[in-house]
Image: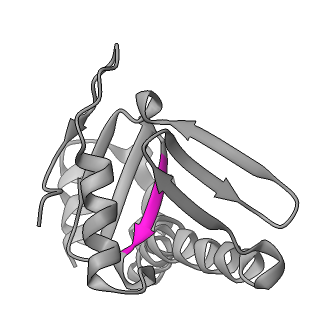
Amino acid sequence: MDLAIIFIVARALGADRLVSLKPLLEPQLAYLLLGLFLYLALARPYVRSRSFVRQTMGTERTASYLLNESGIEVRHLQSLSHYDWSAVRLAKQTSGLILLYFEENSALVFPKRCFTSPPQLSSARAIIAAPRSVTNPRRVTDLPR
């Protein structure tokens, strides 16, 4: 209905050339375009991310993380990576996650449910929040809980 009003107003203003846009103002096509937009904006990224998680889950791709005073070690089945604490730019905590950002779009995410006990979670928080003398000090937000 609103699109039809726009078409009538445009026609009243002398925009006879807008007749070619009439199919776009039909309700069925407008709903189809709205549905396509919502799918591309909301549903497709969700479906793709779920597919990615399902593909990368399993024992052969499981990683273990070791947080110590020198940094973070990430161990996969056939590889070992090490991140120095000086590379961590920002540490955040939400109600269910601990996030360590290295760059704007790069982070390690630790779900709190993956820690075996509350003391283990507390020691991880203490290691992350420990002051270190680095050239680029990171900001730590909401870690001591």
For the point 68% across and 68% down, the residue is 63
Q: Quadrant of the N terminus?
A: bottom left
Q: Quadrant of the C terminus?
A: bottom left
Q: Main secondary structure of the magenta part?
A: strand
For the point 42% across and 86% down, the residue is 116
Horizontal relation, residue 111 to residue 55: left or right: left
Residue 18 sits above or below residue 30 on the image: above
Given residues 88 and 25, the one toward you in this image is 88
> Measured from the top left, where is residue 41 in percent x and y?
46, 65
For the point 76% across and 85% down, the residue is 58
Given residues 41 and 102, the one toward you in this image is 102
Residue 22 sits above or below residue 48 on the image: above
How are the colours assigned in the image?
one colour
Horizontal relation, residue 13 to residue 52: left or right: left
Horizontal relation, residue 70 to residue 12: left or right: right
> Measured from the top left, where is residue 79 in percent x and y?
82, 54
Residues in magenta, as a range: 107-111
For the point 13% across and 55% down, the residue is 142
Number of numbered tags placed on the structure image: 0
**Residue that extends furthest to the right in the rendered view of this protein:** 78
Verify whether residue 21 appears in magenta: no
Residue 31 sits above or below residue 88 on the image: below
Given residues 135 and 126, the one toward you in this image is 126
> Measured from the top left, where is residue 25 in percent x and y?
39, 68
